[in-house]
Amino acid sequence: EDQVTQSPEALRLQEGESSSLNCSYTVSGLRGLFWYRQDPGKGPEFLFTLYSAGEEKEKERLKATLTKKESFLHITAPKPEDSATYLCAGVYSGAGSYQLTFGKGTKLSVIP
Amino acid sequence: DSGVTQTPKHLITATGQRVTLRCSPRSGDLSVYWYQQSLDQGLQFLIQYYNGEERAKGNILERFSAQQFPDLHSELNLSSLELGDSALYFCASSVWGNTEAFFGQGTRLTVV
């Protein structure tokens, strides 16, 4: 069973059309949740860290929120340069260590 | 620039060969992760080190091994290479396991 599940797999938006990406996670053992942006052939770029339900973080047109079961990445009035794959990752503790587990990502395309 | 350096950027080698990928973490980061990303696939966790010690293992093949040295740089060794090992290999570092991880730009390995 996947610990982190993202939906939708792909999303096409018109420029300026706001939307949200979803990340569902296994609650047991979760110690933090991260959002990343990945451009093709590049390393994931860190966006946000969320630790507690109710927490929100914002950066430009992006806002990440965390509930007890899910996290959302809200994109307001997106621009073509926001096109990328957005990855959600959960940090899980166990056996004296932490493991960072990624979802499969949502590929966002913003059409001019 | 995330501060994580991976070398080489590209590597082309033949089946059956052995290669070594290198990662220098961000200054002050003690934890290093290795991930594999095949074409259009998600990030697969391979292995994690913390301050020189192995802390977590994912689906890492027996043909693959890694280590973290006293200066905290890490190497991932891939041996008896097969065509299916062709992928992007990413290194990430963090201060500790439940803090945000920063990724390098990856090594693109092509096995021919």
Image (spheres, coloured by chain):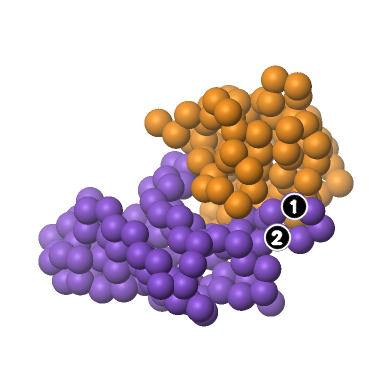
Chain colours: A purple, B orange
**Farthest top residue?**
B71
Residue B17 image point, x, y percent: 78, 31
CA distance separating discs 2 and 1: 6 Å
Residue A13 image point, x, y percent: 22, 70
Residue A22 image point, x, y percent: 41, 74
Residues at circles 2 and 1 in contact by the CB criterion of under 8 Å: yes
| Same-subunit check for callouts 2 and 1 | yes
Q: Nearer the viewer, residue A93 or A10?
A: A93
Q: In this view of the protein, can residue A62 be seen by the observer?
A: yes
The residue located at (66%, 38%) in the rendering is: B31
Residue flagged by tag 2: what amino acid is it? Ser
Quarter of the image with the N terminus of chain B in it: top left
The residue located at (16%, 65%) in the rendering is: A77
Q: Which mark is residue A93?
A: 2
Q: Which residue is mark 1?
A: A97
Circle 2 chain: A
Circle 1 chain: A
